[in-house]
Structures are given as C-alpha cells and as structure tokens.
Amino acid sequence: MIRIEGLRVRYGEGDFQLRIPELIVERGTTTAFIGPSGSGKTTLLNLIAGIIRPETGRVETRNVEVSALSDPERRRFRVTTVGLVFQEFELLEYLSVLDNILLPYRIHAALDLDASVRERARALAERVGISDKLDRPPRRLSQGERQRVAVCRAVLTDPPLLLTDEPTGNLDPVNRERVLDILFDYVRESGTTLVSVTHDHEILARFSRVVDFRDFHSFGEAGVS
Ligand code: ADP
Ligand code: MG
C-alpha cells in the first residue's frame, strides 16, 4: 500500500531532517507511528497523503508515486484515496456538523455529493452517537464528539487508506476507547489500511505494527555529512 525509498525531507534551512531509507506498509495492516515530539511523524503523514513533497526519494501510495504528481493531481489523489484525521481535527466553525462531515464532497469536483452520500453521512453519525447534533456548529460539541465528527468525515469517501494524527490525544479514557473502537471496527470491516500517529503507549497493542521514529533519526544523524 505504501512504499518509501531513499526519503529525505527538510524544511528550508532548519535543523530538522527526516531520512527513511526504506519503509513498506502492507495493504490492510494497522501501523502506529511513535517517537518524540518533533521527530517527523506528522511530516511523514503529510508526505504519504501528498500534502507535501520530499526533497529526494520516492513516496508511493497505492502504486501511485505521489511525490511525482502535479499539485492538482495530488489533490485529486488525496481526496479520492486518503481519509485524514488531523491532530487539531480541522473542523470549520461556520459549517454545521453535517456539512463538516460532507466537506470532502463540497471541496472537490472529483466527488459527487448525492442523496446516497448524505444518507451514508447520517448513518455514520448515527453509528458514532452524534446523529442528534448534525445541525450544530462544532463549537457546541465536546472534544470527544468533535473527534467523532472528524472520523466520520475521514471515512465518508470509503478511502483505501486512513491516516490519523494522534486521534486520541485530547480525549478522556472513555472517549479514547470509543473513538478507537470506531476506527478499528471500520478498518476491520472495510479492509482499509490504517496508519496512525500516537503518543499513547497504552493503545499500541491494537496495532499490527509499531514504527519508532527514533530509528530514522539515529540513521539520519549518522548519515549527515
Ligand atoms: P511530530 O509530528 O513528530 O511532532 P513534525 O513532523 O510535526 O513532528 O515536525 C518535525 C519538525 O519539522 C519539527 O522540528 C517542526 O518544527 C518542523 N516543521 C514541521 N512543519 C514545518 C513547516 N511547515 N515549516 C518548517 N518547519 C516545520
Ligand atoms: Mg505531530
């Protein structure tokens, strides 16, 4: 599903450097990215999703070399292939909860917003327990509810790849388990590949694989000339 080779990323002239000689994520697996703050976990999600491009190396997602696509091609690839749950949820306050869930269909012509999509959005909201809050703005939701909105939005397109950035970072234990159950149930039923950044070592047992970013950094520093 994901194949990374000879990757090097920096931001401008800053000190940060991420180097990954090789990383392969198999289709249908669940992978946790762990490592210290600032070690490049969010950066790698952004590369896999085609939001940013590497300085050198290849990022191949679902047999598409995302690092070689033009900007419009990458936007199209992202919206049709990848479901993203961002660290800060990125809900829009001027839209209702329902319209936040429908957002991918509102912003890209490659997706067609029809009655069946609306029906699916409502069914997802029902499933995660927010169906009575669809008309509200996101600010009138709890953190746990906001996170569930973000998850509904990410899976609405039925993406083959789901990328989540600290999906339980701001949640209490009850909501944490609830959001994880929703994510992992979805992944199991749909065969989606899941890659999730997490700081939460208590949830690692749920994943089939753990990738520790400290490994990339010791390699990176040794390789800097
Ligand atoms: P993590 O998610 O592991 O905490 P990030 O991938 O967010 O780490 O960031 C890695 C490093 O890159 C950090 O030092 C951060 O400050 C820097 N960084 C992240 N995004 C940018 C950006 N857009 N411009 C410049 N530096 C950035
Ligand atoms: Mg991060």
Image (cartoon, helix red, strand yellow):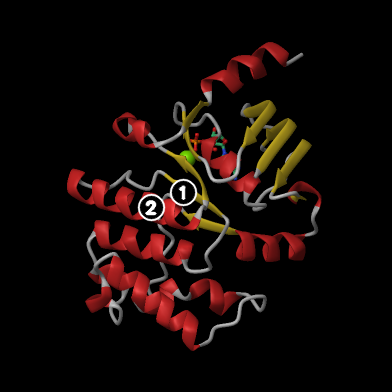
Relative vertical location of residue 28 with respect to residue 133 in this rendering, above or below: above
Identify the residue position indicated by label 2 in the image. 183
Relative vertical location of residue 103 with respect to residue 199 in this rendering, above or below: below
Q: Nearer the viewer, residue 196 or 142?
A: 196
Q: Is residue 205 left or right of residue 157?
A: left
State whether residue 163 appears in this view. yes
Residue 88 in the image, given as x and y percentages of width and height: 40, 53
Is the Cβ of the residue at disc 2 closer than 8 Å to that at disc 1? Answer: yes
Q: Is residue 155 left or right of residue 200?
A: right
Work out which residue is located at the far bottom of the displayed protein and give it. Answer: 115
Q: Residue at x 67, y 52 (%)?
A: 50
Q: Residue at x 46, y 76 (%)?
A: 102
Q: Residue at x 42, y 36 (%)?
A: 207
Q: Residues within 10 Å of mark 1 (few under 14, many from 20)?
A: many
Q: CA distance from mark 2 to mark 1?
A: 10 Å
What kind of element bears circle 2? Answer: helix
